[in-house]
Image: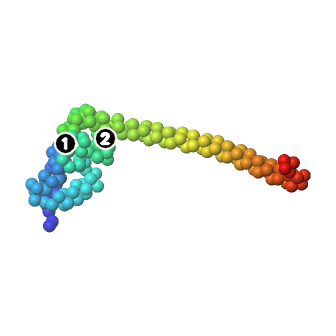
Amino acid sequence: MKYSDERREAVLRKLGPPNNRSVADVAAEEGITAPTIYAWRSQARKEGRLMPDQGTQGPDGWSSRDKFNAVLETATLGEEELAEYCRRRGLYPEQIEQWRLSCEQANDRAEATAQRQADSIKEERKRNRKLTQELKRKEAALAETAALLTLRGKADAIWGDEES
């Protein structure tokens, strides 16, 4: 069944902030199947609209991508414009600020993780080098012992076994 663009937008408004209603609730109310509404929500997200996950109130229903987009949208807004933006979407300015800080710190966490991995790799290479040297030393000692045993056997064969 083909739905009008106006009806589709009305349904999406019910899913979006500040209502943040669940897909199941809206589907039952509107008489539209849930998979259809999920597809509409998915399409709206692809178009760049902020659509929180179903039925969650507040910022918990927002995906990382939506939070990042909200931070980008509000980056140049003044205090009054930010307040209006937050009212339209059912948010608080403090939430936007918290998301902004998380976005800024994301790179710090990535750099710290990369540094830890580099340090770990360096330690493993050092350990590998030490174990390789130890293995070479033990192989040389084993080869020397084998050579001495072979010589002893030959010497015993030539001069006879003195113990007997």
Q: Disc 2 residue type?
A: Val
Decide if residue 6 is on the left or right side of residue 125. left
Near mark 2 (Cα within 10 A), the count class, few <14, some 14-19 or many ≥20, is some
Disc assigned to residue 57: 1
Horizontal and vertical percent position of residue 163: 84, 47
Residue 138 sits in quarter = top right
Q: Residue at x 18, y 47 (%)?
A: 55
39 and 117: which is toward the camera:
117
Q: Residue at x 30, y 34 (%)?
A: 97
Q: Which residue is mark 2?
A: 71
Horizontal and vertical percent position of residue 45: 26, 53
Q: Disc 1 residue type?
A: Gln
Residue 122 sits in quarter = top right
Near mark 1 (Cα within 10 A), the count class, few <14, some 14-19 or many ≥20, is some
Q: Residue at x 84, y 50 (%)?
A: 164
Dot in front, 1 or 2: 1
* SS at circle 2: helix
